Image: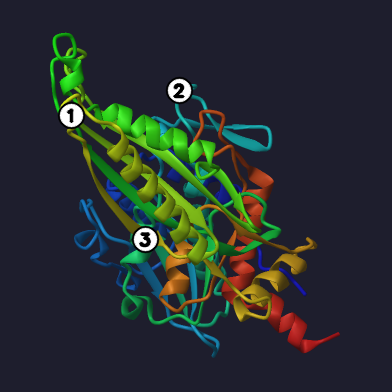
Amino acid sequence: MSLPELLEDRAVENVLRLLRIPGRSREEGRILAEIQQLLQEGGVPATAMEFDRAHEQIPGGGEVGNLIVQLPGTLSGPRRLLMAHVDTVPICVGADPVVEGDRIRSRNPHSGLGGDDRAGAAVLVTTLLELVRQGLPHPPLTFLFCVQEEIGLYGARYCSLEQLGRPAWGFNWDGDDPAEICVGATGDYALEIAIEGVASHAGVHPELGVSAAAIAALAVADLQRRGWHGLIEKRGQRGTSNVGVIEGGAATNVVMPLLKLRAEARSHNPRFRKRIVEQYRRAFEKAAAKVKSADGKTGRVTFSAELKYEAFRLPDDSPAVAIAAQAVSALGLSPQTCVANGGLDANWMVAHGVPTVTLGCGQDEIHTVRESLSIPSYLTGCRLGLLIATGAAEQSTSDGP
């Protein structure tokens, strides 16, 4: 089988160009404008591009919705979706990408690179440009550049299947090793806990107050002691939880009357995940009943849990898995399936009815100032994009020797 040609220097320049543009979650307008410009410079017609209105449905809004690019097929077959997200975490604002050997790093020592997921977005851009440049035959294709993945998978959650052309399968680039095919991911509940205590002067009459901080401390200590905080393993079930945000208090001379916490509970097993949530609820309610003022007053807890995304696991015989595996094998690599303990845009695409796998494109040490991008792995990700977009690996398999 002859592989589609890839202009490697151009592919590297594409990712460098995208890495230079800031675009934290909710502020993706500039990066999507840059992607549009890149595509139009390469011959992709403006009429093939449109934005959806996902940002109008996302809590908290945003500058812009998802960018969608559709190409009519020159080959018959089900429509394929190629996708990646374009937003980066705040630490990546100020990235100054530079090539060092076979890696790209940020020259700014105080910023991350943003390869998560500008590398994935560049795979899509490069694939589109090569399809047009070479006039490669392909089935109907949709390219989806998602917003607001980093703060809740929102772009994928609120995308429109109608605007995507109702694809049969999805392929998401967001990871490290291009030989790994992620076929599943965990589910996640977002927990919000508000504790209302009783204010009192901390020096004159501390005994008349009910400390919201004391209630929170007791609850978290109880969860930790009983194995419900951090890594959770109970009777063959596994999950995680974390209290990540604590906000409260305004003065040291006031018994803290109000405290808000934000936490999460994750597990691949929906029932076990709900059990983790219930353990949190009970721990905080029990702690509120234990902390009393001298005159018998207690605090109050308001508890809410929202499902951020559901877990999924594609079967081994899913066409999306087979297509990805054939493409990986065509590049001389050994495909390996894996399951993620973090959320992916694929979680919501599967929930929408589009079986979606996630592939790697060279990201390393993401969300840190040590982040880098492996150029060889990124280029392999681009080659996978071309093989999956054209179906060349499957055609070779079906043709036989």
Give how far across and how far down residue 188 sits, in percent.
44, 56
Q: How many other residues sit within 10 Å of disc 2, few (<14), some (14-19) or many (≥20)?
A: some
Distance, label 1 to label 3, CA atoms, is: 29 Å
Q: Secondary structure at mark 2?
A: loop
Q: Nearer the viewer, residue 315 or 277?
A: 277
Quadrant in which the C terminus is drawn: bottom right
Q: Nearer the viewer, residue 284 or 194?
A: 284
Q: Nearer the viewer, residue 397 or 306?
A: 306
Q: Earlier in the sequence, mark 2 or mark 3?
A: 2
Determine which residue is flagged by label 3: 307
Q: In this picture, is 372 found above or below 188?
A: above
Residue 54 lies left or right of residue 147; in this view the side is left
Q: Can residue 121 be seen here?
A: no
Q: Secondary structure at mark 1?
A: loop
- Give the residue type at disc 1: Pro
Figure disc tally: 3
Distance, label 2 to label 1, CA atoms, is: 37 Å
